[in-house]
Each structure stands twice: as structure tokens, then as C-alpha cells.
Amino acid sequence: MPPEKHALLSASSASRWLVCTAAPRFEEGLPESISTYAKEGRLAHAIAELKVLKKFTAAVTPGAYATRLNKLKKEELYDPEMDKTTDLYLDHLVEQAMLYDSAPTVAAEVKVDFGEYVPEGFGTCDCVMIGCDTLSITDYKHGKGVPVSAVDNPQMRLYALGALKRYVPVFGDTIKKVRMTIDQPRLDSYTSDIITVEELKAWGESIKPIAQKAFSGLGEFVPGEHCRFCRGKAQCRARAKVNTALEDFKDCVPMSKATPEQLAQAEEDGRDGIPTHLLSDAEIGDLLIRGQQLVQWYKDLEEYATKALLDGKPIEGWKLVAGRSNRTFTDQDAAIKAVIAAGYDEALVYDRKPKTLSELEKLMGKAEFAEKIGSFVVKPLGKPALALATDKREAYNPAASDFAGVVQE
Ligand code: SF4
């Protein structure tokens, strides 16, 4: 598969450059490396595209489909899971097509141009459907790191603006609504957002000045969660400043070690008896959030330094050493045979273990698994874990743990 060309202000990085307008030009000057995950994603996309073309269009004959699919399956990064996840994606597209009163027009891997809103902006929609008054775009995501929601998603909105530009000349103003969907089958995450064409265009107008600033190279560095996928995440000074600002709290002492003077000062400051040098609960909440960024930043620095040292670039004060490893047989079958030949009973040499719940579900398929052994499945309440207040999961309810073991998924 040839390397993909990306716009400076790509749709996939929009959630970053819409906040940190300095990022695109900063990243531009840094070397790009394509991760194995990205390569796997591209292969899965190629399989998905082929399946969409076969299902919805006459662009691929059955013979050509089989030949092309077999060729993709011979790629080094091919995993049978890709076949399953792209099937799920296809099933979901079929469901979406059935939402239309009559069969919609369907196209796969559609090149779109949203340069009217974002300088030199272009990209590719994985699937576009048009029928009645609705244009529908769907993005397949092969990653299983974090679920990505389609709601208020700038990447999807930019693709949608590009798709409108492409299809309005054909379908005219019959298109009144846009449905944007993100399918992430490996995370069982399927989300959609629907807005009117007017709302979408108004949003496009609202981001124009931001896009201009990001393109011009006069943008500002604004660190945040979006740094995670930035090419400059390890070297960015603005991000380093935010994280080293935790220094502000370096003089804090535990409550038990506060001096009478500090306690008296806190009283005077009206901080509910909390000394200036102690953290309030609000500060702890804030620090926990900033600490998450700090941990991620430190990991990024480690990753950067490891790569630099592997590439022969010195990082002062650091070197690479061999990590821990476990002993292993060069030929396990031959080793086991030798153990049995030495007089040990086979029953002592082998463990007979049942397959795990997930392995059995994979073996039987979801439907048969649910029918035959679903009644044996329970999902106990997990241990309480700290999460951000904005987390979509329900707050932990200790009373619910009384029913642990009878909660069924
Ligand atoms: S690391 Fe963060 S702050 Fe720095 S350029 Fe990238 S997105 Fe902006």
C-alpha cells in the first residue's frame, strides 16, 4: 500500500489544532514515524473498502473480490480479527442503509476537499451514503486504545463539509441533514451525531479564523489532553512548562506535619483549617488531573529517549540496558518428549485447563454462546476505581456490591 498523503491541517488532527494552533507548523518540522498500529489500520481499511464495494456497488466482481481479499490476507500484518471487525462494520453499514426509505447511493474511500473552511484541507471518508434528505458518512476506526465519539467530533464535521461540497452539485439542496458515525468494532463502540446542513456550515464558518491562524504559523501553544497524539509531544517546551508547574506545590507538607504557625495561618486565611502549605481537597482534585498529564508526558519522554539512544543519539545521563527476559525452550515439543522419555507421566507434564470465557465466546460465536451458556455468565461489580467526574460510566454505588455476582451483562 502506498504511503498516505496528509494535509497540514488534517481532519484527524483537528481536535488538536483547533485548540493548539501552533501544533501543525511545529509538527511539520519533526520527523514522522508510522507506527505498526497505523499500518494495521490501513490494512484493515483496505479490507473494509473492498467489502463495501462488493456489498453496495458493482465496482468489484466476485472473482476480483476474492483475488484482492486473498492478496490483502497475505500481507504481513494481516490478522483474522480484521476479517471479523470489517464484517461488523459492514453489518452496521447495512443497518444504516436500511434507515433510508429507498436504497441509498453508497461510495467507499471518497476523497473530499474541505479547503473552503480549512486552508488546503482534504481527506478521505471511509463510507458515504446519500438518500432522501440525509447524507451519511461513516468512519471505521481499527484502533482499540480509546473509544472516539462522533458527537461534536471535528474530524467528522470536516469530512462532512467536504462530502457536501462533492455531492451537493449532484443531489442539489435535497440534502438537509448530515449523519456522522464512528464505528470502532474492536471496542464495541458505535456512535452517531446528526445535524442540519445549516448547523454544519455555521460550524465550518466558526472555525475558519482558527484554521487560518493554525495554517499561518502564528498560532499559540496550548497544551492539554490533545498533546497525546502530537508528533512533538516529547520535545514541546510549552507542554514541559505545564507539567513542571507541579513544582508550585513542592513546599506542601502533610497535615500531620504542619507547624502550629501554619495551622494558625490557615485559620487566619479562612481556609477551613487547612494550612496554606497543605493541599485542599479542591487542589487535590486539580492535581490528580494534572498528574495524569504528567504521567503521560513522562512516558512520552521515556519513549523519545529510548528511540534516540537506539538511533545512536546520546541523551545525557541515560543509557539503554537489556530488560528482563524469561527462559524459554528452543524446541518445546522436543523438550517435552525428552521429559516423558525420562520416565515422567504425561499427566504430570501437561496441564488440562478449560478455555477462558472470551475464548469460548470466540469459538462459539456470540449468538450460540449466549443461547447455550449465557445463563452461566455473571458480571460481578468491579472494585472502586478513581475516574474523572466527566467519565461516562455511572458513579460507583457501594450498595450495588451487595448484589455482586448476580449482575448479568
Ligand atoms: S505537544 Fe501539545 S502544546 Fe506542544 S505543540 Fe503539540 S499539541 Fe501543542
Image (cartoon, rainbow, N blue to C red):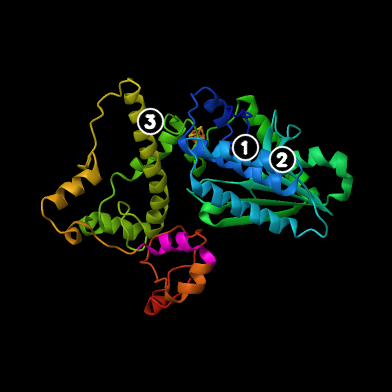
Q: Return the residue nearer the eye: 5 or 46.
A: 46
Q: Is residue 237 visible?
A: yes
Residue corresponding to mark 2: 60
Main SS class of the magenta portion in the image: helix
**Residue 176, x across and y down, in percent:** 83, 52
State how far apart marks 1 and 3 are (Cα).
Answer: 38 Å
Residue corresponding to mark 1: 68
Q: Please determine whether, in this image, residue 208 is positioned above or below residue 129.
A: above
Residue corresponding to mark 3: 304
Q: Residue at x 39, y 36 (%)?
A: 300
> From this viewpoint, which residue is outermost toward the left?
343
**Residue 111, x across and y down, in percent:** 71, 35
Amino acid type for the residue under numbered disc 2:
Val
**Residue 223, x across and y down, in percent:** 49, 38
Q: Indicate left or right for 96 with 30 as reference.
A: right
Secondary structure of the residue carrying numbered label 2: loop
State how far apart marks 3 and 2 are (Cα).
Answer: 44 Å
Q: Earlier in the sequence, mark 2 or mark 1?
A: 2
> For the residue carrying disc 3, how many other residues have a C-alpha within 10 Å: few (<14), some (14-19), or many (20+)?
some
**Which mark is nearer the camera, 3 or 2?**
2
Give, as a single range, the part of the protein colored magenta.
Answer: 355-367
Whether the magenta-drawn stretch holds residue 366 is answered as yes
Task: Locate the N terminus by quadrant.
Answer: top right
Q: Earlier in the sequence, mark 3 or mark 2?
A: 2
Residue 212, labelled with which disc? Answer: none
Q: Return the residue nearer the eye: 348 or 54.
A: 348
